[in-house]
Image: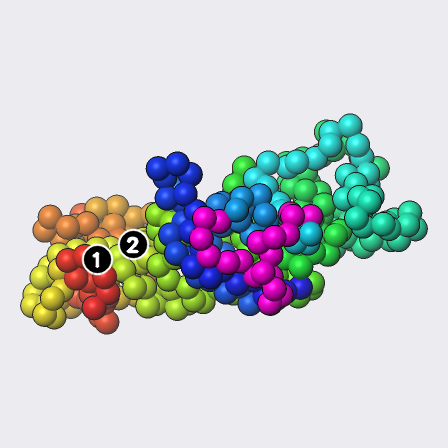
């Protein structure tokens, strides 16, 4: 495993600036998630580290040494894609063994068999080793795809939205599995997603990208509690942060144009009246959709709440976030 460092990396595709002066350190053994919408530069970052693209400017180092002159094979990284990338005519065993039969690996058959068995056990697919890839479920196929990366034991694992094509239950299951695998291997993961739940539940560090720029990097808790802008604040949190005019509850700090309210920032029982528009019962929580004058606010109902649509309750902000006219945090 190894630390990965990007220093002032930029990349353009014609007139489109995919990355602009990005500096980022992925600590050895970390699970770093790059978060942002389509076009933010997430996949480009992965491809640059893998050697599938060359930067226009800047440097990329793995394990303290620049890899700009190295081929993708020489960089010793493994990439997992959104699609499964399996050979359908091969068995699970043969798919897992395939990367180890590369001339660069130079492994013996006994060593390959032992490694395949080890990875299959980690991924809990040992009972599927003799199945053809076409006879697997979507979740099993993605496990095998992840296994094709794991067998090589590379310096870093690069994952490009590997769970996005799975249904909700499989995504939840594999989130847990990936975090378990990361903990067992102590490996370095760089994982790309636009799904904030994946970022919050799996990452040791989150990097938020906006139109090719890294706008904030920190732990999920730091990003959630201390976002640098409304853009970052809107990337994490369910329900999403509510952004209102700064004076929605009265006087605001100098320079404030918007007030940001997460559910825990809304105190119920005193303050301004708001009407319950609807409730969403989600099992472990109930979301309240409130109307306060022209403004819609989403918060959480207390566990013992008996509120119903049409009811009125009083609310006020408690330690909210404040933002200026540019959307930057005050």
Q: Residue 3: x and y, percent?
A: 59, 66
Proximity of marks 1 and 2: CB atoms separated by less than 8 Å? yes
Residue 187 in view in this figure? yes
Looking at the rendering, the stretch of residues picked out in magenta corresponds to 55-73
Q: Secondary structure at mark 1?
A: loop
Q: From the viewer's perspective, is residue 88 above or below residue 276?
A: above
Q: How many marks?
A: 2
Q: Earlier in the sequence, mark 1 or mark 2?
A: 2
The residue that appears at 50% across and 65% down in the rendered structure is: 25
256 or 23, nearer to the observer: 23
Mark 1 packing: few (<14 Cα in 10 Å), some, or many (20+)?
some
Residue of label 2? 231
Q: Residue 175: x and y, percent?
A: 57, 52
The residue that appears at 49% across and 45% down in the rendered structure is: 43
Residue of label 1? 327
The residue that appears at 81% across and 50% down in the rendered structure is: 105
The residue that appears at 60% across and 56% down in the rendered structure is: 67
- Magenta residue check for 108: no
- Image position of 55 (left or right of 258): right
Please name the colour scheme applied to the rendered image. rainbow
Residue 177 in view in this figure? no
C-alpha span from label 1 to label 2: 7 Å
36 or 198, nearer to the observer: 36
Q: Secondary structure at mark 2?
A: helix
233 or 244, nearer to the observer: 233
């Amino acid at each position: 495993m190894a630390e990965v460092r990007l220093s002032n990396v930029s990349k353009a595709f014609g007139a489109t600036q995919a990355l602009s002066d990005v500096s980022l350190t992925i600590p050895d053994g970390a699970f770093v998630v790059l978060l942002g919408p389509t076009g933010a530069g997430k996949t480009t970052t992965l491809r640059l580290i893998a050697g599938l693209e060359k930067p226009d400017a800047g440097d990329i180092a793995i394990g303290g040494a620049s890899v700009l002159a190295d081929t993708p094979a020489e960089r010793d990284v493994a990439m997992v894609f959104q699609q499964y990338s399996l050979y359908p005519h091969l068995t699970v065993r043969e798919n897992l063994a395939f990367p180890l039969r590369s001339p660069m690996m130079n492994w013996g058959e006994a060593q390959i068999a032992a490694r395949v068995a080890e990875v299959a056990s980690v991924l809990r697919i040992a009972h599927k080793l003799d199945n053809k890839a076409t006879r697997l479920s979507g979740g099993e196929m993605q496990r095998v795809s992840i296994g094709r990366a794991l067998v090589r034991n590379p310096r870093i694992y690069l994952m490009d939205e590997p769970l996005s094509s799975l249904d909700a239950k499989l995504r939840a299951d594999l989130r847990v599995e990936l975090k378990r695998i990361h903990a067992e291997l102590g490996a370095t993961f760089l994982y790309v997603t636009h799904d904030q739940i994946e970022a919050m539940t799996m990452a040791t560090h989150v990097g938020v990208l906006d139109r090719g720029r890294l706008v904030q990097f920190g732990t999920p808790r730091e990003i959630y509690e201390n976002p640098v802008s409304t853009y970052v604040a809107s990337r994490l949190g369910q329900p999403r942060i509510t952004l209102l005019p700064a004076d929605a509850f009265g006087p605001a700090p100098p320079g404030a144009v918007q007030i940001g309210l997460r559910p825990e920032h809304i105190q119920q029982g005193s303050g301004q009246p708001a009407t319950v528009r609807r409730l969403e019962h989600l099992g472990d929580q109930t979301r309240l959709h409130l109307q306060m004058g022209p403004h819609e606010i989403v918060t959480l109902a207390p566990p013992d709440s008996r509120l119903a649509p049409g009811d009125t309750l009083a609310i006020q902000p408690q330690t909210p976030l404040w933002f200026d006219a540019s959307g930057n945090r005050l």
